[in-house]
Amino acid sequence: MSNEIFHPDFKQRPYWWEAVAPTEEAEVELPARTDVLIIGGGLTGLNCAIELARGGAHVTVLEANDFLWGASSRNGGGVSGGTNLGKGLSGSKGRSSDAEHQEKIRAMVEDSAASLAHVESIIAREGIQCHFELNGRFVGAFTQKHYDGLAGKVEFYNKVAHAGAEMVPRERQREEIASDYYYGGMRIERVAKLHPALYTKGLVDAARRHGATLAGRTPAGALTRISDGWRCDTPRGPIEADEVVIATNGYTGGLTPDLQRRVIPLASHIITTEELDPELAASLIPKNRVLSDTKRVLCYYRLSPDKRRVVFGGRARFTQVGPEVSAPALHGMMLERWPQLKGTRITHAWTGNTAFTFDFLPHLGKTEKGLHYAMGCNGSGVAMLSYLGAQLGKKLLGGQNRVTSFDGQPFPTRPLYYGKPWFLPPIGTWYRIRDWLDRRVG
């Protein structure tokens, strides 16, 4: 690419794939029948498979592409827990009483906090080497009003999620970021980061080690109810199962149209810089935290595990676009926060689908036809989808009616929505206008 921001060795693929990339693996023999068939080989499906296999179930995972291909290795690697439900909490009241509403919120925040603990435990138990670091997050307030809003949440987050949250006023902001872009912000200790491709590869290895059958490049075809379960057609022949789990999240398609119209695939774009001077890199984020902000068109960013590059992501566009569009937009956002990076070039740019829901909450449950599902990460999938996948595995093993506060909640859709988010471009434009207005009003 000729644009001066692109490094001569620029690659249109995730930086994380330099360590481990999706590769075609030896074809495994599909069983004629399995206890549980999981469709989708990302964080949800792999965590579910590990839990089931450890519990003695015969489990098979179908992945349409190579393992590591999807959003599980395309994300920024932030691992939140307990402070990441956002709009979902404020909009979840419904018709319940205030007491019921508060209890529902408390249970969801506790489950969200447990998602981080789950990731910690599975990494330790399975010996996954993925640069897991519990260094915390700094959430930059885009306006003074946003700062005041964050301050109102600190006590609750600390009481319920044990988040270790504390407000950092603007005059102390450079303790967290070498920038004056924000109006202060919230420091949260109970947030981690990891290398997403190495984490996902560790889950793949663990699932196989525990006895799960993992079949890459094997897309699921028609699902048919049979007398004793399900039959799923594949290009390599049919497979029967007692139970079926849909773990497709931001890549949910026409195979399950009822679920497809309940999740909104939203493109998230990321760039990585060339190697920086070590002193400059260390100065950008003095405490090596994950960073994010309160903008509607939000950004999230961090240093690479070797602390030599900036990995910078955000809503460059709300739809799939190429790096010729997304990379300059993200590069400009990065320079707004760090003007000292002017002249820094980009070595990698990529995108992946997150799955948003209309109530901004993750969901676990069972469709009317009897398919199990866990999806709707709303941008916080590393922890939440890992957790929900494992919780669904527990549910299938134990036969419980409910394993988490996100289980069995109403899963809304909207009229005229069938899985193609035609409304995202105008929403993106409106969000940018609102951000512009907010900054000027304060």
Image: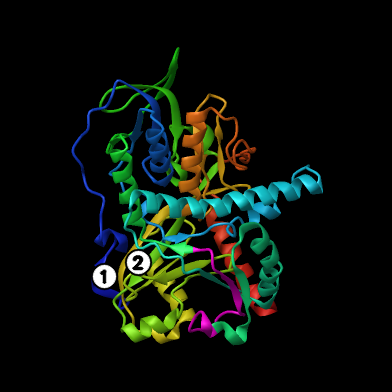
Label annotation for residue 1:
1
Q: Position of residue 142 (x, y in %)?
A: 60, 74
- Against 103, residue 342 (above or below) is below
Label annotation for residue 324:
2
Mark 1 is surrounded, within 10 Å at the Cα level, by few (under 14), some (14 to 19) or many (20 or more) other residues, namely few
- Where on the picture, by quarter, is residue 4? bottom left
Q: Position of residue 132 (x, y in %)?
A: 39, 62
The residue lying furthest to the front in this view is 125
- Colour scheme in use: rainbow
Q: Position of residue 98 (x, y in %)?
A: 80, 49
Query: In the displayed structure, does residue 163 sit left or right of residue 135?
Result: right
Residue shown at 69% from the left, 62% from the top:
156
Camera-side residue: 231 or 107?
107
Amino acid at circle 2:
Glu
Camera-side residue: 46 or 435?
46
Camera-side residue: 429 or 167?
167
Residue shown at 64% from the left, 56% from the top:
87
Mark 2 is surrounded, within 10 Å at the Cα level, by few (under 14), some (14 to 19) or many (20 or more) other residues, namely few
- Specify the quadrant that holds the N terminus: bottom left
Q: Is residue 419 visible?
A: no
Asked which secondary structure carries label 2, the reply is helix
